[in-house]
């Protein structure tokens, strides 16, 4: 299940795009200014970002340039009312993977998103290793010795997040913010229950848990 950051200052347009993406089974987080989008890209993991050119605080081109300069490789779709060829070139040269002028149809937005997520450079195409476990985020799959371990969607997202941040310790509240951040009705207890289920599925009987608990500190996968 791909996670998408949507940065669009027009809240009506943002709501329409978010609704269309959600109906297509994507997880969407919306922000309405460039500074918040920059913070989200720095702190959280996404599979694709949709950025409006004219964001307040930090415009989409500035945000995109800074993100690419810092090494960010996320597929980026740029939205803008600036449809002349010079602006298209500027947007693409700044690091956008695709460029869509306003007004646009939701069908075209969804088609562009599908196309970008199919590209080989997408983040989720990675194969992540934890000991004898192989995590395949693009397929929402975890394998041990070639045999798939069945995980629920949130269990997969939690394992993916901890694997990408090996060596870092997170409290239940931090995991709630970073993995459940778009679900306001979730609680720290939901995080703990998910960790419990996940451990039961991925740990070998009689061996130490892959996900370590640091007493009074939090949870982590060792690097």
Image: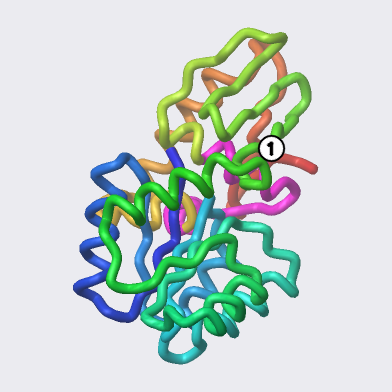
Residue 110 falls within the magenta-colored stretch: no
Instruction: From the viewer's perspective, tell me whether residue 163 is left or right of residue 79.
Output: right
Residue at 74% over, 72% down: 70
Q: In the image shown, does 9 or 94 lie closer to the viewer?
A: 94
Task: Mark 1: give few (<14), some (14-19) or many (20+) Cα within 10 Å.
Answer: few
| Magenta region, residue range | 158-177
Residue 206 vs residue 118, the one in the foreground: 118
Q: Position of residue 160 (x, y in %)?
A: 58, 39
Question: In which quadrant of the rendered image does the C terminus lie?
Answer: top right
Q: Position of residue 190 (x, y in %)?
A: 36, 41
Q: Residue at x 41, y 32 (%)?
A: 153
Quadrant containing the N terminus in the rendered view: top left
Q: Residue at x 44, y 55 (%)?
A: 4
Q: Quick check: is 170 in the magenta stretch?
A: yes
- Name the residue carrying label 1: 126
Q: Is residue 214 visible?
A: no
Q: How is the image coloured?
A: rainbow
* 55 relative position to 199: left or right: left
Q: Height in image: 165 above or below 15?
A: above
Majority secondary structure of magenta residues: helix
């Amino acid at each position: 299940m791909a996670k998408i950051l949507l940065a669009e200052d027009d809240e009506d347009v943002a709501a329409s795009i978010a609704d269309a993406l959600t109906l297509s089974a994507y997880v969407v987080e919306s922000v309405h200014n460039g500074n918040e989008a920059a913070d989200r890209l720095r702190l959280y993991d996404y599979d694709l970002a949709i950025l409006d050119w004219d964001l307040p605080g930090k415009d989409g081109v500035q945000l995109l340039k800074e993100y690419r300069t810092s090494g960010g490789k996320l597929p980026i779709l740029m939205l803008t009312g600036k449809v002349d060829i010079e602006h298209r070139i500027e947007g693409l040269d700044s690091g956008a993977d695709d460029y869509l002028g306003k007004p646009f149809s939701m069908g075209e937005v969804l088609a562009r998103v599908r196309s970008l997520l199919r590209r080989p450079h997408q983040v989720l195409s990675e194969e992540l290793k934890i000991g004898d476990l192989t995590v395949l985020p693009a397929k929402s799959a975890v394998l041990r010795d070639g045999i798939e371990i069945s995980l629920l969607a949130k269990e997969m997202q939690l394992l993916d997040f901890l694997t990408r941040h090996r060596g870092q310790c997170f409290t239940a509240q931090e995991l709630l913010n970073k993995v459940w951040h778009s679900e306001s009705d979730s609680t720290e207890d939901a995080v703990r229950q998910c960790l419990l289920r996940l451990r039961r599925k991925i740990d070998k009987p009689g061996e130490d848990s892959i996900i370590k608990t640091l007493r009074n500190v939090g949870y982590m996968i060792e690097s």
